[in-house]
Image: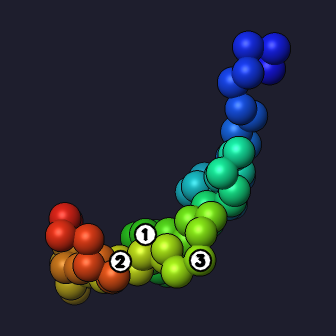
Amino acid sequence: YTDGTPEVSYAYDDFNRLMRINDATGTTQYTYYADGALHTVDGPWDNDTLTYTYDRLGRMTGISPQTGQA
């Protein structure tokens, strides 16, 4: 971009779920459980992966490592 805006690209899987974002910071990757619920988000830095857990009804029960938010 001529105005200095960094380029961002997005990649999606066959189910139209976000798989990857590439930007000036690096790559963030997303994985999903078989039912389509978000499983992990792995950002561009070391040790920044978040893992999401759900109960049998599909309600989010946790994010690891704990962020203090749900």
Above or below for 28 versus 4:
below
Q: Which mark is residue 69?
A: none
Nearer the camera: disc 2 or disc 1: 2
Residue 16 lies, in percent from the top left, at 60, 53
Q: Which mark is residue 38?
A: 1
Amino acid marked by disc 2: Tyr
Residue 57 lies, in percent from the top left, at 19, 78
* Image quadrant assignment for residue 60: bottom left
Is residue 70 found left or right of 50 in the rendered image? left
Taking the spot 43% from the left edge, 69% from the top edge, the residue there is: 38
* Image quadrant assignment for residue 28: bottom right
Q: Secondary structure at mark 3?
A: loop
Taking the spot 56% from the left edge, 57% from the top edge, the residue there is: 17
Residue to which mark 3 is pinned: 46
Taking the spot 62% from the left edge, 64% from the top edge, the residue there is: 44
Is residue 1 found left or right of 34 in the rendered image? right
**Badge 2: how crowded within 10 Å, few (<14), some, or many (20+)?**
many
The reply to whether dot 2 and dot 3 touch (C-beta < 8 Å) is no
Amino acid marked by disc 1: Leu
- Seen from this angle, which residue lies furthest right? 2
The reply to whether dot 2 and dot 1 touch (C-beta < 8 Å) is yes
Residue 25 lies, in percent from the top left, at 66, 51
**Badge 3: how crowded within 10 Å, few (<14), some, or many (20+)?**
few
Q: Earlier in the sequence, mark 2 or mark 1?
A: 1
Above or below for 13 versus 8:
below
Q: Quadrant of the C terminus?
A: bottom left
Residue to which mark 2 is pinned: 52
Residue 26 lies, in percent from the top left, at 69, 56
